[in-house]
Image (cartoon, coloured by chain):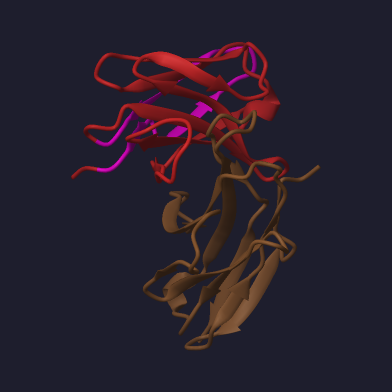
Chain colours: A brown, B red
Amino acid sequence: AQKITQTQPGMFVQEKEAVTLDCTYDTSDPSYGLFWYKQPSSGEMIFLIYQGSYDQQNATEGRYSLNFQKARKSANLVISASQLGDSAMYFCAMRENYGGSQGNLIFGKGTKLSVKP
Amino acid sequence: KAGVTQTPRYLIKTRGQQVTLSCSPISGHRSVSWYQQTPGQGLQFLFEYFSETQRNKGNFPGRFSGRQFSNSRSEMNVSTLELGDSALYLCASSLWSGQGSYEQYFGPGTRLTVT
Protein backbone atom coordinates (compact mmCIF):
# COMPACT_ATOMS: atom_id res chain seq x y z
CA ALA A 1 0.00 0.00 0.00
CA GLN A 2 1.12 3.53 -0.70
CA LYS A 3 2.48 5.20 2.39
CA ILE A 4 2.31 8.68 0.88
CA THR A 5 -0.42 9.61 -1.59
CA GLN A 6 -0.49 12.78 -3.62
CA THR A 7 -3.66 12.68 -5.70
CA GLN A 8 -2.98 15.73 -7.88
CA PRO A 9 -0.49 14.94 -10.64
CA GLY A 10 -0.67 18.54 -11.86
CA MET A 11 -2.16 21.83 -10.80
CA PHE A 12 -2.44 25.34 -12.14
CA VAL A 13 -2.69 28.49 -10.05
CA GLN A 14 -2.87 32.13 -10.95
CA GLU A 15 0.01 34.30 -9.78
CA LYS A 16 -0.63 35.91 -6.36
CA GLU A 17 -3.35 33.40 -5.47
CA ALA A 18 -3.08 30.71 -2.80
CA VAL A 19 -2.91 27.03 -3.65
CA THR A 20 -3.25 23.82 -1.63
CA LEU A 21 -1.35 20.66 -2.52
CA ASP A 22 -2.82 17.51 -1.05
CA CYS A 23 -0.98 14.77 0.80
CA THR A 24 -2.31 11.82 2.75
CA TYR A 25 -0.15 9.31 4.57
CA ASP A 26 -0.43 5.89 6.09
CA THR A 27 1.49 4.75 9.14
CA SER A 28 0.91 2.89 12.35
CA ASP A 29 3.90 4.54 14.04
CA PRO A 30 2.90 6.92 16.84
CA SER A 31 5.91 9.10 16.09
CA TYR A 32 6.69 10.33 12.61
CA GLY A 33 7.61 13.42 10.67
CA LEU A 34 6.15 14.89 7.52
CA PHE A 35 8.16 16.94 5.05
CA TRP A 36 7.51 18.89 1.90
CA TYR A 37 10.18 19.36 -0.75
CA LYS A 38 10.22 21.43 -3.92
CA GLN A 39 12.03 20.20 -7.01
CA PRO A 40 12.53 22.76 -9.78
CA SER A 41 13.42 21.61 -13.28
CA SER A 42 17.11 21.76 -12.31
CA GLY A 43 16.55 18.62 -10.22
CA GLU A 44 17.68 19.69 -6.77
CA MET A 45 15.27 18.92 -3.91
CA ILE A 46 14.67 21.95 -1.72
CA PHE A 47 13.34 21.47 1.81
CA LEU A 48 10.27 23.62 2.49
CA ILE A 49 8.58 22.68 5.74
CA TYR A 50 8.38 20.04 8.47
CA GLN A 51 5.57 18.83 10.75
CA GLY A 52 6.08 16.41 13.62
CA SER A 53 3.32 14.02 14.62
CA TYR A 54 3.25 15.43 18.14
CA ASP A 55 3.32 19.08 17.12
CA GLN A 56 0.19 20.84 18.37
CA GLN A 57 0.30 23.68 15.90
CA ASN A 58 0.48 23.66 12.14
CA ALA A 59 3.95 24.45 10.81
CA THR A 60 4.57 27.67 8.91
CA GLU A 61 7.61 28.90 7.01
CA GLY A 62 7.13 32.19 5.24
CA ARG A 63 4.58 31.70 2.46
CA TYR A 64 4.37 27.97 3.20
CA SER A 65 2.09 26.45 5.78
CA LEU A 66 1.16 22.88 6.48
CA ASN A 67 -2.46 22.01 7.18
CA PHE A 68 -1.98 19.01 9.46
CA GLN A 69 -5.07 16.92 10.22
CA LYS A 70 -3.78 13.96 12.20
CA ALA A 71 -7.07 12.07 12.50
CA ARG A 72 -7.52 12.20 8.75
CA LYS A 73 -3.82 11.48 8.16
CA SER A 74 -3.46 14.43 5.89
CA ALA A 75 -0.67 17.00 5.60
CA ASN A 76 -1.57 19.47 2.89
CA LEU A 77 0.84 22.19 1.82
CA VAL A 78 -0.58 25.67 1.40
CA ILE A 79 1.36 28.21 -0.62
CA SER A 80 0.09 31.75 -0.23
CA ALA A 81 0.55 34.50 -2.81
CA SER A 82 1.95 32.21 -5.53
CA GLN A 83 4.91 33.45 -7.53
CA LEU A 84 6.15 32.40 -10.97
CA GLY A 85 9.19 30.88 -9.29
CA ASP A 86 6.94 28.47 -7.40
CA SER A 87 6.42 26.48 -10.60
CA ALA A 88 8.00 23.11 -9.81
CA MET A 89 7.33 19.57 -8.63
CA TYR A 90 6.32 19.30 -5.00
CA PHE A 91 6.88 16.16 -2.98
CA CYS A 92 5.38 15.14 0.32
CA ALA A 93 7.54 12.77 2.37
CA MET A 94 7.37 10.94 5.68
CA ARG A 95 9.92 9.61 8.12
CA GLU A 96 8.70 6.93 10.50
CA ASN A 97 10.61 6.97 13.74
CA TYR A 98 9.96 3.39 14.80
CA GLY A 99 8.96 1.66 11.59
CA GLY A 100 10.96 -0.65 9.41
CA SER A 101 12.17 2.18 7.24
CA GLN A 102 14.50 3.17 10.10
CA GLY A 103 14.45 6.82 9.35
CA ASN A 104 14.72 7.13 5.59
CA LEU A 105 12.30 9.40 3.78
CA ILE A 106 9.35 7.85 1.96
CA PHE A 107 8.16 10.07 -0.88
CA GLY A 108 4.89 10.53 -2.68
CA LYS A 109 4.69 10.65 -6.48
CA GLY A 110 4.63 14.45 -6.48
CA THR A 111 2.42 17.25 -7.79
CA LYS A 112 3.53 19.46 -10.65
CA LEU A 113 2.52 23.04 -9.90
CA SER A 114 2.36 25.59 -12.69
CA VAL A 115 1.89 29.25 -11.82
CA LYS A 116 0.24 31.33 -14.53
CA PRO A 117 1.07 35.05 -14.94
CA LYS B 1 28.34 26.90 4.13
CA ALA B 2 28.67 24.89 0.93
CA GLY B 3 25.79 22.61 0.02
CA VAL B 4 25.79 18.99 -1.00
CA THR B 5 27.80 18.41 -4.13
CA GLN B 6 27.50 15.52 -6.53
CA THR B 7 29.80 14.53 -9.35
CA PRO B 8 29.47 14.05 -12.18
CA ARG B 9 26.24 15.90 -12.97
CA TYR B 10 25.61 13.97 -16.17
CA LEU B 11 26.78 10.58 -17.30
CA ILE B 12 26.15 8.36 -20.30
CA LYS B 13 27.06 4.70 -20.09
CA THR B 14 26.30 1.58 -22.08
CA ARG B 15 24.64 -1.58 -20.85
CA GLY B 16 26.94 -3.89 -18.98
CA GLN B 17 29.32 -1.19 -17.84
CA GLN B 18 29.71 -0.05 -14.28
CA VAL B 19 29.52 3.45 -12.86
CA THR B 20 30.61 5.25 -9.70
CA LEU B 21 28.86 8.37 -8.45
CA SER B 22 30.26 10.66 -5.79
CA CYS B 23 28.63 12.78 -3.10
CA SER B 24 30.20 15.29 -0.75
CA PRO B 25 27.89 16.18 2.16
CA ILE B 26 27.57 19.48 3.92
CA SER B 27 30.50 20.04 6.25
CA GLY B 28 29.82 18.43 9.61
CA HIS B 29 27.09 16.13 8.33
CA ARG B 30 27.77 12.48 9.03
CA SER B 31 24.83 10.86 7.29
CA VAL B 32 24.54 10.40 3.55
CA SER B 33 21.51 8.85 1.88
CA TRP B 34 21.06 7.95 -1.76
CA TYR B 35 17.80 8.01 -3.71
CA GLN B 36 16.92 6.97 -7.24
CA GLN B 37 14.33 9.03 -9.11
CA THR B 38 12.62 7.75 -12.25
CA PRO B 39 9.41 8.89 -13.97
CA GLY B 40 7.80 5.51 -13.40
CA GLN B 41 8.83 4.63 -9.85
CA GLY B 42 9.33 8.10 -8.43
CA LEU B 43 11.81 8.63 -5.61
CA GLN B 44 13.07 5.45 -4.04
CA PHE B 45 15.51 5.05 -1.19
CA LEU B 46 18.70 3.19 -2.03
CA PHE B 47 20.81 3.21 1.14
CA GLU B 48 22.11 5.34 3.96
CA TYR B 49 25.55 5.62 5.48
CA PHE B 50 26.36 7.08 8.85
CA SER B 51 29.89 7.29 10.19
CA GLU B 52 31.14 4.93 7.47
CA THR B 53 28.56 2.25 8.28
CA GLN B 54 25.58 1.31 6.16
CA ARG B 55 22.58 1.86 8.41
CA ASN B 56 19.75 1.05 6.08
CA LYS B 57 19.21 -0.33 2.62
CA GLY B 58 16.28 -0.08 0.24
CA ASN B 59 14.90 -2.77 -2.00
CA PHE B 60 17.46 -2.73 -4.78
CA PRO B 61 19.53 -5.57 -6.26
CA GLY B 62 23.07 -6.24 -5.15
CA ARG B 63 24.39 -4.46 -8.26
CA PHE B 64 23.84 -1.27 -6.31
CA SER B 65 26.41 -0.70 -3.61
CA GLY B 66 27.91 2.17 -1.73
CA ARG B 67 30.45 3.24 0.80
CA GLN B 68 31.34 6.18 2.96
CA PHE B 69 34.78 7.49 3.75
CA SER B 70 36.12 8.90 6.99
CA ASN B 71 35.51 12.46 5.74
CA SER B 72 31.82 11.52 5.21
CA ARG B 73 32.07 11.65 1.42
CA SER B 74 30.14 8.83 -0.14
CA GLU B 75 30.22 6.90 -3.36
CA MET B 76 27.66 4.65 -4.92
CA ASN B 77 28.48 2.05 -7.51
CA VAL B 78 26.23 0.32 -10.01
CA SER B 79 27.68 -2.69 -11.75
CA THR B 80 26.44 -4.37 -14.93
CA LEU B 81 24.27 -1.44 -15.90
CA GLU B 82 20.80 -2.06 -17.31
CA LEU B 83 18.61 0.29 -19.34
CA GLY B 84 16.29 0.59 -16.35
CA ASP B 85 19.06 2.11 -14.29
CA SER B 86 18.68 5.34 -16.23
CA ALA B 87 17.60 7.81 -13.57
CA LEU B 88 18.42 10.87 -11.54
CA TYR B 89 20.46 9.79 -8.52
CA LEU B 90 20.10 12.12 -5.59
CA CYS B 91 22.31 12.27 -2.56
CA ALA B 92 21.14 13.81 0.71
CA SER B 93 23.10 14.66 3.81
CA SER B 94 22.02 15.27 7.37
CA LEU B 95 23.55 15.76 10.80
CA TRP B 96 21.71 12.83 12.28
CA SER B 97 20.41 9.45 11.32
CA GLY B 98 17.43 7.36 12.30
CA GLN B 99 14.65 8.88 14.37
CA GLY B 100 14.06 12.59 14.57
CA SER B 101 12.86 15.79 12.99
CA TYR B 102 16.09 16.52 11.17
CA GLU B 103 16.06 17.68 7.59
CA GLN B 104 17.91 16.05 4.77
CA TYR B 105 19.63 18.42 2.36
CA PHE B 106 19.79 17.23 -1.19
CA GLY B 107 22.41 17.69 -3.85
CA PRO B 108 21.67 18.58 -7.49
CA GLY B 109 21.77 14.95 -8.54
CA THR B 110 23.60 12.92 -11.15
CA ARG B 111 21.59 12.16 -14.25
CA LEU B 112 22.64 8.75 -15.53
CA THR B 113 21.62 7.60 -18.99
CA VAL B 114 22.23 3.98 -19.95
CA THR B 115 22.16 3.20 -23.68
Q: Quadrant of residue B9?
A: top left
Q: Quadrant of residue B2?
A: top left
Tell which residue pokes out farthest to the right in this image.
Answer: A1
Image-based side of A5 in relation to A65, left or right: right
Q: Position of residue B48 (x, y in %)?
A: 48, 25
Count of numbered circles on the image? 0
Residue located 56% across and 46% down the image: A32
Tell which residue pokes out farthest to the left in this image.
Answer: B1
Looking at the image, residue B44 lies above or below residue B39: above
Quarter containing the N terminus of chain A = top right
Q: Position of residue B32 (x, y in %)?
A: 40, 28
Looking at the image, residue B76 lies above or below residue A94: above
Toward the viewer: A14 or B28? B28
Image-based side of A26 in relation to B52, left or right: right
Looking at the image, residue A57 lies above or below residue B96: below
Whether residue A112 is visible: yes
Residue located 23% across and 32% down the image: B28
Whether residue B67 is visible: no
Toward the viewer: A47 or B3? A47
Residue located 64% across and 27% down the image: B85
Toward the viewer: A37 or A44? A37
Magenta segment range?
B3-26
Q: Quadrant of residue A48?
A: bottom left
Q: Position of residue A102 (x, y in %)?
A: 56, 29
Verify whether residue B17 appears in magenta.
yes
Q: Position of residue A52 (x, y in %)?
A: 50, 54
